Amino acid sequence: MPTNTMKAIRLHEHGGPEVLRYDEVPIPEPKPGEVLVRVHAVGINPPDWYVREGMSNVPPDMRPKLSLPMIPGTDVSGVVAAVAADVDGLSVGDEVFGLLRFPSFEGSAYAEYVAAPASDLACKPARVDHVHAAGAPMAGLTAWQFLIELGHDHPSPFQAARHRPMALNAETTVLINGAAGGVGHLALQLAKWRGARVIAVASGAHESFLRELGADEFIDYTKSRPEELLHDLDLVLDTVGGRDSGRFLRTLRRGGALYPVFPGDFDDEQTAKLGVTVSATQVRADGAQLAELGRLLDAGTVRVAIDSTFPLADARAAHERAARGHIRGKIVLTVA
């Protein structure tokens, strides 16, 4: 067994990247239903910097309570180091990856070891290294639960109705806004896997990358506004979302749908008049769905693009990279 302490990134206060501290802390012990994972790589996601900033982007009445000091992060790839007595199906030495405890913010992934619910984990694809596997969980499950299968009955904080993904096939045209980002580049590949025609929207620097992933058409948003060029689309997945997401409503056919990953304000009267649906959900940890995605990763049907990697100790630099934007794929922390 390892010694009883480890290195981890912790928040003692909220603020900019400078508040990420490299501390020595006790190694957690797996509780019932959990395994201890020796972390090899950690995927960075937007909720990580939301937590670091104190969730200031969330309305006060929806803001979760965060107890400091805390270890941020949710996405890991690593090796099982210990297993609780009641856990079946995982053994010491197994390579695993997972989205931990989300939508809570208690994943504690920015560390050399993490106690992880066994149900949140899947076996790491054998042909994928830990860095690429760590980039997959949150972004991949977001794309999966929006586009392929929701896979749970938990109510969404964003809408009363349950999100129901549209069936994708060769007759479906999908626009993906923010297609070069973590969720976007995986969603593009999943839509192509299901046979859809995909229009990718990103800055011009990403065109060749997105066409290599299978985009049928590309729009450089710095030169053209897709809502002025397109119409009669079946589905728009807006991974940028927010206040401007409503501009995509005019691109849809009657019966079409807009899925904003980051919900904005929409006029119910307008959507009813246009005959379209606006639907969102909140990604949730799901080891079984991740195993399905893992099979696609192992086969090379879907691949994770890595924007950049940083050692765990340099988490501040990784967050500074994220703040500069225009990310291609995923930013990952490596753990020695």
Image (cartoon, rainbow, N blue to C red):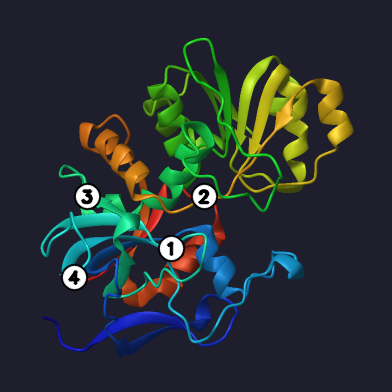
On the rendered structure, is 7 left or right of 165?
left
Q: Amino acid at mark 2?
A: Val
Mark 3 or mark 2, which is nearer the start of the sequence? 3
Q: Quadrant of residue 296?
A: top left
Which mark's residue is nearer the viewer, 3 or 1?
Answer: 1
Residue 141 % position (x, y): 43, 45
On the rendered structure, is 60 left or right of 24?
right
Residue 171 % position (x, y): 53, 10
Q: Which residue is mark 1?
A: 101
Q: Amino acid at mark 3?
A: Lys
Q: Mark 3 packing: few (<14 Cα in 10 Å), some, or many (20+)?
A: many
Q: Is residue 223 visible?
A: no
Disc 1 is placed on an element classified as loop
> Residue at the spot x=64%, y=70% of the render?
55
Say which mark, if any, is on residue 85. 4
Say which mark, if any, is on residue 283. 2
Mark 4 or mark 3, which is nearer the start of the sequence? 4
